[in-house]
Image (tube, helix red, strand yellow):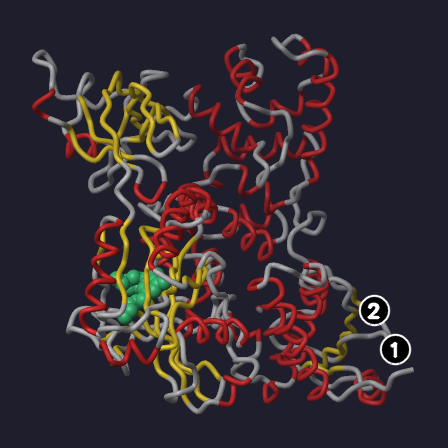
Amino acid sequence: MATKKSPAARSNELRALLHHHGHRYYVLDRPEISDAEYDRLFNELKALEAAHPELRTPDSPTQRVGGAVAEGFVSVQHRVAMLSLDNAYSVDEIREFEARLSRALPGEAFRYVCEPKVDGLGVALLYERGLLVRGATRGDGRMGEDVTQNLKTVRTIPLRLQGPLAATDLLEVRGEVFMGRDAFDRLNRALETEGEEPFANPRNAAAGSLRQKDSRVTATRPLGLFVYSLSDAPPDLFATHWESIQALGEAGFKTNPRSQSCPDIEAVVAAVTALEGDRAGLGYDADGVVIKLDSLDQQRRLGSTTHHPRWAVAYKFPAQQATTIVRKIEMGVGRTGALTPTAILEPVEIAGATIGRATLHNADEIERLDVREGDTVILERAGDVIPHILEVVIEKRPRDTAPFVFPAACPVCHATAFRPEGEVVARCTNPECPARLKESLLHYGSRRAMDIEHLGEAVVEQLVDRGLVRHFADLYALGVERLTELERLAEKSATNLYTAIQASKGRGLARLLFALNIRYVGENVARILAMEFGRIETLSEATEEALAAVHGIGPRIATSVALFFRQAENRRLIAQLGQAGVQMDERASTGPKLLLGKTFVLTGGMESLTRDQAKEAIQRLGGRVSASVSKKTDYVVVGADPGTKADDARRLGVTILDETAFRRLLAD
Ligand code: IVH
């Protein structure tokens, strides 16, 4: 049997393993182990480092999620200015770029590299002897902001370089931080459920995420990075840009798989055309292709203007626009009661997609555009994201139009719509508005909430219109027979729906809280509340102060949650859900189980929590508490005046946690 490794040796081993598997997963997209196995290794390292803080290294994978809240960002001067790029808008202008090169370097041949011009934000990463020491935004090109802690949360940025580049004293690497389109959509949906303003586009989302004061927030934002240059390195390390990018790939960075080495300008034109055609399928926004001269020697000899390097040009994809007519402006009602206007359009094609509607966001936006029914508008799909109306073609406005009047009442239930001072959104004030109820039910049953399969739009529509469901709890009273009465629901589908509704009773507190549609309570907040309070009774009794004292819960959320549980109709709803058999504690659920498979032994008294509280906290995270220490014990938590169990732990080489280390482990 293998002897137990020392904590130092084991933590080194774990770090190496986690580096390896993190790189396989995030950079190469070819994992070798399951997510659960990765989490197990990660948690083991985290616990070891909690018990032995001196073993924590700056490049440890646990250091990606910092935690320190920045007051503001420190300005940093870039070692080498981050310049802009000259633009080209046609194939002719690409050829003109080569003609300029030939004039400057007569008689020489040119090879190129073509890279997608990812629409994110440029960053500069500084490595000293392979260790990431600083990461900064581009800023104005000369001065940027130090966002090291936030960049460390980006999984495709290596904290320590691999291979030969790791030995170099000083390296600066540049790349583009971006957010993929799917991730952007998911983030915006989550922000909306938490009552936050969504981002206008993935670029803003990436920039906003990178400039968060709390790196734990950045860590939840799915940012990516493609490296595009080795901007500062000892001279003569590489002869070509292409080689340097390959080397950065070997050092652990994610390089853009769509970058291409091109032997001549014809190959460049082909590469640019191909990328333009595939633009929609890239998964992220790209606004063009950066064409770079490959030879670093030629680059040096050409140099830069104060604005851009002479050896590169950005070919910009043509904007994707179309002109069409607004048939109608339709008002919808969301589950928070928000009135959302949509322009119904004469269908029009932009870059292969047929567009029939465009969101108008809110009253301010309609006013800004002065868009009216019957107007001709210019529609744009910026970087292939959701199309929006750019402007109205006033010359084409029919004679008899009137400015659009934003309704003062809910278009569905006709209750007053209220727009608080300073907010852009008007909301229906009727809590029983059928439109809100329908949206709320769809949310309640959605995959990330109570996950009720088959509870789709058509079913919800009928359940509400027939008066069968007035609130969530009514769902659980529906029998198969009732459901079969619905249109287009044969017995088999009705049975499936019934089973799905019943199964949703066991989803646990975190999902339930998310499902309940409490203002500002999105998935994350719901999980934090469930973890902290464990049971809905405890949560519903918590004061605003107690709520706001929880890490990750701000005053706005605290007020909203306290208000929700004060309202009689909500208390009634919770009671009815409870009677229906919906589980309202977190232990029974499938939340994150960070201590899954770990065995604890508690000995001695702790100052900040009782034995029962400690036990409950461990169990809530999936851990087990046992009475005696054995080789299978993972941790012995030692308080004041411990018994012989502490000695047993030492003898058997089991990790010992004092109260501080234990609390840190739970808090982590
Ligand atoms: S090269 C001195 N390569 O585009 C060379 N830039 O207008 C300039 N960008 O802010 C940068 N993808 O952040 C380069 N493959 C790529 C790029 C890229 C996106 C951004 C970059 C910069 C802007 C230049």
Ligand 1 resides in the quarter of the picture at bottom left
Tell me: residue 609, above or below residue 186.
below
> Which three-letter amino acid code belongs to the residue tagged 1?
Ser
Label at residue 626: 2
Image position, residue 241 (x, y; %): 39, 73
Determine whether label 2 and label 1 are within 8 Å by CB: yes
Q: Which x, y percent locates residue 646?
A: 79, 85
What amino acid type should be assigned to the residue bearing mark 2? Ser
Element carrying mark 1: loop
Does dot 2 land on a helix, a strand or a loop? loop
Instruction: Estimate the x, y position of residue 162 in percent, counting from the top left.
Output: 56, 80
Q: Please tell me which residue is depicted at 53% across the width and 27% down the height of the picture.
A: 441
Residue placed farthest to the front in the image?
107
Foreground: 496 or 652? 496
Q: Is residue 48 left or right of residue 316?
A: right
Q: Is mark 2 within 8 Å of ligand 1?
A: no
Q: CA distance from mark 2 to mark 1?
A: 10 Å
Q: Quadrant of the C terminus?
A: bottom right
Q: Which mark is residue 630?
A: 1
Is residue 632 toward the left or the right of residue 359 in the image? right
